Structure formats: structure tokens, C-alpha cells
Amino acid sequence: MRVLLFLLPVFALAQDGANYDIIERTLNFLLFFGILLYFIAKPLKQMYLNRITGIANRLESIAVKLRESNNKKDDAIKRVDEAKINAASFVETAKKEAVLLAEKIKKDTKNEILNLEKSFKDQKEFEERKMTKAVVSELLNEIFDDKNLKVDQKELINIILKKVG
């Protein structure tokens, strides 16, 4: 605009003797430009402010989303850290339970072996008594079946004791 003001006298004095209406045309142009600027300035200014507001709103929504995503990221990191701590404690607990379970199985196995040995010993004694009874019964049957053999009671007891022993 200032350039026009400086160029206005140049155009005014540059007349070649002919009567040109450059000053009037320039004034008309400046007046037209001023009126145009007056009527268009407010809508242009409003459009510019709306654009600035729209950009600011988009930037604000992006900032909100960024804060939300950062909060979610922080929460996820906290949950991962808690999961690591829980996993470590679970592993430690599992190891302790495995040791306790192994000790329990070992103890139960020892008790079972002792029970089996006792059962075997009892069964062995039972079988020995059973065989002793069978031998004594067989021996007595042989003695009593034989009619020619006469044995008194003391001899019978001695014979039985020898067979059993």
C-alpha cells in the first residue's frame, strides 16, 4: 500500500502533456480496493480464525489421544512388571511345592516299603507256621496210621520237637 502512495506522484507527473485521468483512476482503484477490503475483511478474518480454531481443536484432540495412549502404555508397563513379579513368585512357590511334594513322596514310599517288609515278614511267619502244622500233621498221620508202631507220649514229643526244630 505504501508503494502505491510513493508511485502515485510518479504517475501523476508522468503525463506527457496529454490529459490522462491516471489520478482519478488510481483513486477509484484505491477506493474500490478499500471498499472491497472493508466488506471482505471480516469474513476473511472470521474464516482465518475458524481455521486457526479448527487446527487448535485437532491439535488438542491429538494431544488428548496422546496422553490417553501414554497412560495406557504406562498401565500396560505396570501390568507387565506386576506379571513379572507374580511369575517369579509363582516359580518360587512351584519350586517349594515340588520340594515338599518330593519329600512327601519319599516319606510315603519309605512307609510303603516298611509296610511291605512287615507284610512280607508276617506272611513268611504265617507260611512257616502253616508248613510246620502241615509237617506235624503229616508226621502224626504217618505215626498213627502205622499200627505196628507203638510210641509212648515222651517219644512222640521228642520226635515232633526234632522235626519242627
Image (cartoon, rainbow, N blue to C red):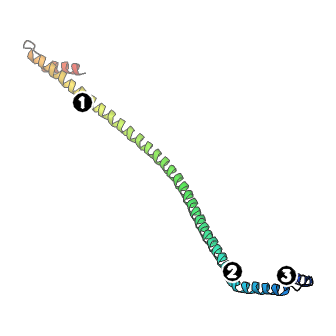
Sequence-wise, which precedes: disc 3 or disc 1? 3
Q: Mark 2 or mark 1, which is nearer the start of the sequence? A: 2
Residue found at the very far left of the displayed protein: 147
Q: Amino acid at mark 3?
A: Leu
Asked if the residue under mark 1 is in contact with the one under mark 3, i.e. CB atoms within 8 Å, the reply is no
Q: In this rendering, which labeled residue sits more in front, label 1 or label 2?
A: 2
Which quadrant is home to the C terminus? top left
At 69% from the left edge and 81% from the top edge, which residue is drawn?
45
Residue type indicated by callout 1: Phe
- Please state which amino acid type lies under the numbered disc 2: Leu
Q: Which residue is mark 1?
A: 126
Instruction: Please provide percent x and percent y for residue 15.
Output: 91, 83
The image quadrant of residue 161 is top left
Picture disc at residue 4: 3
- Residue 109 left/right relative to 39: left
Q: Is residue 84 above or below residue 9?
A: above
Between tags 3 and 1, which lies in front? 3
The residue indicated by pointer 2 is 44
Residue mark closest to the camera, 2 vs 3? 3
